[in-house]
Amino acid sequence: MRISLVASAFVAAIVGFGSTLALIVAAADAFGASQAQTASWVTAICLAKVFETGYLSWRYRMPVITAWSTAGAAVLAASSGFDMNEAVGAFVVAALLIIATGLFRPLTVLISRIPPSVASGMLAGVLVTFVIGAAGTIPVEPAMVLPLIALFLVIRVFSPSLSVLVVLVCGIGWVLLSGRIDNLPAPELSTLEFIAPRFSLQAIIGLAIPVYLVTMASQNLPGLAVLRADGFQPPTGPLLSVTGLFSLISAFFGAHTTNLAAITAAICTGPDAHPDPDKRWLTGPFYALAYLVFAVFGASLVALFALMPATLIALVPGLALIAPLANALALSLADDERRIAAIATFCVTASGISIAGIGSAFWGLCAGIAVLSAARLKPSA
């Protein structure tokens, strides 16, 4: 057993969890979730990743690393006008759509036909609000925020994957040392809280469909590409079906969708994890073990985050989403013929408009498709 297998799995797990946990907390706050419901969300989604990664890696003998949908969480955190029960109903629908995509190949083909420029424009429109929000923390608490941003920029030169995690740890340390928190929360084991779903057309169109689309386009499809790039042949249907199934189960405890990881998966799928590709699947069980620990202590972590200042909670996800935003913008503008459609999608999504209770992500997608459809009216030469 090479130590690199264990190290790669644990680094991937810590980076994935620590760099975007604040985004989960922000999404829960957007729905008015209680601290217990937020803790249940974190616990359930961690347990889903434990079972998905452990089973799929063992079943197919390849490093199938799963993650929560960061893009989906960004869509949720940017939404408004929904409560937690409606959100759970949307999570259920999104999970069913992922299962259907895994079971019926035509759906996979249909999703792959969504122009990458339009899908990336929608994602960029969602992400930009968080990056702008991070910049907005500078005049609020410059003494804390500016050093953390400087630290982020320096660490990122040497290790992009660890930069946000370092900022999070140092930010929490700053808050504790400054005496802004009198008493730390007592350690407590996590519990799951059942949340009854409530289905509404507005939540399905405004939450479920955008979460499904960005999860498929920005995470599941790239996750499959990462595995293929390292010489593996992932079975698309079964992988999507299993992640969709556990997303469905965990949804009733407040968790949004899980999916194939891309960035953190690359830590586990390459030769740095193990020179023998046939041995790399062992990173899966160790990754699952790390998330089992996170699941057990999820309530304590959420309680700690609840004590953190709002500036830190806004800064960390904003910094974490800079690189995804840059990538989404690059993809959205790469196609000259679809650039205007991508910009229209981006602008409408970033506007944050809500029409008939349906959020801007859906309307941004509609705007992009409308621009593309109008362009096809031009007669060919």
Image (cartoon, grey):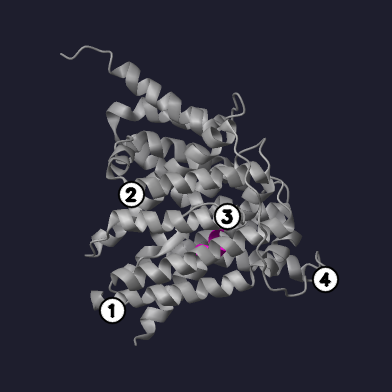
Tag 3: amino acid: Ala
Tag 4: amino acid: Asn
Residue 156: x percent and y percent?
47, 62
Vertical relation: 211 (above or below) 335 = below
Horizontally, residue 24 falls left or right of residue 120, namely right
Look at discs 1 and 3 and give the one toward the viewer. 3
Q: Residue at x 48, y 38 (%)?
A: 209
Horizontally, residue 149 falls left or right of residue 214, namely right
Point out the residue furthest to the right here.
Answer: 182
Give whichever of discs 4 and 1 has the lower sequence position: 4
Residue 233: x percent and y percent?
23, 61
Q: Which mark is residue 279?
A: 1
Look at discs 4 and 1 and give the one toward the viewer. 1
Secondary structure category for the residue under label 2: helix
Q: Which residue is mark 4?
A: 183
Q: Residue at x 39, y 72 (%)?
A: 284
Look at discs 1 and 2 and give the one toward the viewer. 2
Does the image show residue 191?
yes
Give whichever of discs 1 and 3 has the lower sequence position: 3
Tag 2: amino acid: Leu
Vertical relation: 34 (above or below) 166 = above
Q: Which residue is mark 3?
A: 255
Tag 1: amino acid: Lys
Q: Does residue 292 belong to the magenta stretch?
A: no
Give whichever of discs 4 and 3 has the lower sequence position: 4
Q: Are marks 1 and 3 in contact (CB under 8 Å)?
A: no
Is the residue marked by circle 2 packed among few (<14), some (14-19), or many (20+) residues within 10 Å? some
Q: Which residue is mark 2?
A: 103
Does the image show residue 151?
no
Bounds of the magenta segment: 16-20
